[in-house]
């Protein structure tokens, strides 16, 4: 823990409570002192009140003044926590050569408000843990609805303002989200896989045609340029990091839905969810990798060139949420405590979101205590880690609603050599299995070299 230069570390300070933004990474290093773990395990927290408080603070906006929300799932991995309840297999990256290994843990769906321009700051607004058996799309829709309602109550959106933009990655079903949230002042922008197939509007039925009218027009195959046709909007923008950015947009494209999975219980005809497809192609990437085209689907139609450019730029800002996840995990120590119950993990998660919000609100007040190898930047351009570094000097100039923690010694714990008389129950990891139990004859599953395009939503 960083200490002020005017005060040296005292022997009793090693057991002080470290629930401040400047020392959240050290709770797990003193497990012998169990007051912190006991508070998380048996304490109470008014989460609805915290949600309202986070929605009432100043919220960043995009260049055109609209609110831009980003949603994503990050996992608190607990592979060896056999006594922890409600763990499920979480999708991870980079844990094997060309493999995405599933690791047990607690996944959290987080919604943040994005800023304009290049920044590593976001404004966390809500975090919900996915329990075993939860449908991610259903949880996300309810979570977004709650966040938008609180933003409207707080006065961040009023009638006549631009619609709130929700940005998500390819793991979310954008057309379904737009259909469920159609009664809210919100539009959806999601990335789609490059193997998708959408449909054009159905052509008008001729008077002499017999039979049911067509619901879908011709195919728009992402991987087949012959099916694209002329774009409705074509823009080119010069960027510093990516070179020339070429964006093309096709209006009124929709997926062909079927009565399966999410739409299995839908009564009547399935809706036609029209939107705009944007294909973004850049010349280079900062990492030096070969750039691939990015396909985006927006729930609005009739877009002009200005709106198309704003949308793909807003999608690039979605990656700022990854900086927030890295800040929570690596700097503030979100996944450092070895908590057993998921309820304690929820309380610790909300403490971290409140601490991060304190840092964001203090970004204009903290001094830049930069390292010798770091470049000097303006006060409003400080990163979250550098604001946290200077946060400790603000305590002398702010009110103190609570007194400082008293030093104490760690509890002795269970005497050495004494067996545990109350072993904790072990819980299996929840695994969602498919109702189809049939396996290939050779017992192996092989991935096809040329996968078929996905023609259903």
Image (cartoon, rainbow, N blue to C red):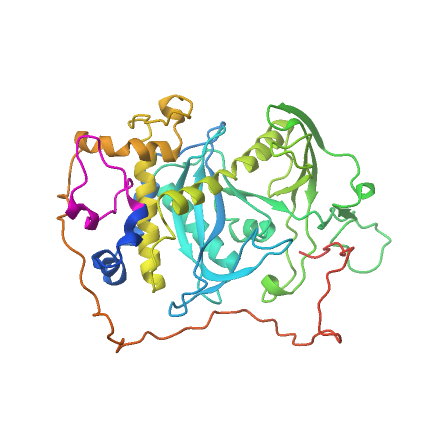
Q: Is residue 423 left or right of residue 129?
A: left
Q: Find residue 60 and report its horizontal and vertical position in percent.
A: 41, 33
Q: Which residue occupies the extreme front position in the image? A: 417
Q: Nearer the viewer, residue 296 or 157?
A: 296
Q: Which residue occupies the extreme bottom position in the image? A: 421
Instruction: Give the total of numbered labels.
Output: 0
Image quadrant for the C terminus?
A: bottom right
Q: Is residue 428 left or right of residue 313?
A: left
Q: Quadrant of residue 67?
A: top left
In the rendered image, residue 12 lying in the magenta stretch gets the answer: yes
- Residue 365 seen from this side: yes
Image quadrant for the N terminus?
A: top left
Q: Nearer the viewer, residue 434 or 64?
A: 434
Q: Nearer the viewer, residue 347 or 162?
A: 347
Q: Main secondary structure of the magenta part?
A: loop
Q: Find residue 350 and report its horizontal and vertical position in percent.
A: 33, 50
Magenta segment: 1-24
Q: Is residue 342 above or below residue 406?
A: below
Q: Is residue 216 above or below residue 260?
A: above
Q: Quadrant of residue 106?
A: bottom left
Q: Find residue 61 and report its horizontal and vertical position in percent.
A: 44, 32
- Residue 52 seen from this side: no
In the rendered image, residue 409 lying in the magenta stretch gets the answer: no
Q: Find residue 17 and report its horizontal and vertical position in percent.
A: 21, 49
Q: Quadrant of residue 125?
A: top left
């Amino acid at each position: 823990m960083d200490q002020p230069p005017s005060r040296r570390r005292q022997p009793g300070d090693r057991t002080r409570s470290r629930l401040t933004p400047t020392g959240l990474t050290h709770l797990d290093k003193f497990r012998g002192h169990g007051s912190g773990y006991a508070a998380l395990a048996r304490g109470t927290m008014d989460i609805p009140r915290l949600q309202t408080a986070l929605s009432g603070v100043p919220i960043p906006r995009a260049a055109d003044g609209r609110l831009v929300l980003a949603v994503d799932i990050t996992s608190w991995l607990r592979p060896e926590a056999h006594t922890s309840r409600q763990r499920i297999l979480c999708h991870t990256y980079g844990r094997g050569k060309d493999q995405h290994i599933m690791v047990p843990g607690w996944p959290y769906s987080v919604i943040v408000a994005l800023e304009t321009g290049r920044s590593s700051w976001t404004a966390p607004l809500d975090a919900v843990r996915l329990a075993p058996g939860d449908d991610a799309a259903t949880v996300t829709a309810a979570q977004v609805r709650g966040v938008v309602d609180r933003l409207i109550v707080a006065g961040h959106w009023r009638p006549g303002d631009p619609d709130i933009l929700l940005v998500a990655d390819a793991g979310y079903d954008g057309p379904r989200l737009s259909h469920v949230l159609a009664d809210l002042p919100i539009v959806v922008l999601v990335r789609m896989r490059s193997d998708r197939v959408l449909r054009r509007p159905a052509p008008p039925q001729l008077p002499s045609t017999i039979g049911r009218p067509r619901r879908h027009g011709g195919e728009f195959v992402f991987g087949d340029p012959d099916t694209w046709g002329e774009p409705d909007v074509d823009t080119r923008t010069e960027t510093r990091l990516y070179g020339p950015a070429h964006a093309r947009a096709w209006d009124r494209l929709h997926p062909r839905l079927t009565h399966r999975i999410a739409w299995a219980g839908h009564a009547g005809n399935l809706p036609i969810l029209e939107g705009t497809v944007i294909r973004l192609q850049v010349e280079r990437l900062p990492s030096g990798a070969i750039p691939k085209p990015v396909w985006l689907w927006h729930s609005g139609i009739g877009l002009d060139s200005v709106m198309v450019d704003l949308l793909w730029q807003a999608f690039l800002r979605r990656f700022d949420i990854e900086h927030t996840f890295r800040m929570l995990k690596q700097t503030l120590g979100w996944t450092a405590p070895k908590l057993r119950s998921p309820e304690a993990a929820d309380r610790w998660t909300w403490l971290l979101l409140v601490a991060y919000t304190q840092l964001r609100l203090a970004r204009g007040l903290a001094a830049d205590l930069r390292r010798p190898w770091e470049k000097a930047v303006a006060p409003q351009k400080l990163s979250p880690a550098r604001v946290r570094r200077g946060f400790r000097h603000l305590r002398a100039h702010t009110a103190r609603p609570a007194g400082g923690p008293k030093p104490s010694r760690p509890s002795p714990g269970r005497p050495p050599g004494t067996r545990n008389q109350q072993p904790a129950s072990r819980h299996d990891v929840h695994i969602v299995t498919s109702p189809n139990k049939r396996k290939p004859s050779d017992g192996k599953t092989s991935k096809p070299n040329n996968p078929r395009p996905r023609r259903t939503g």
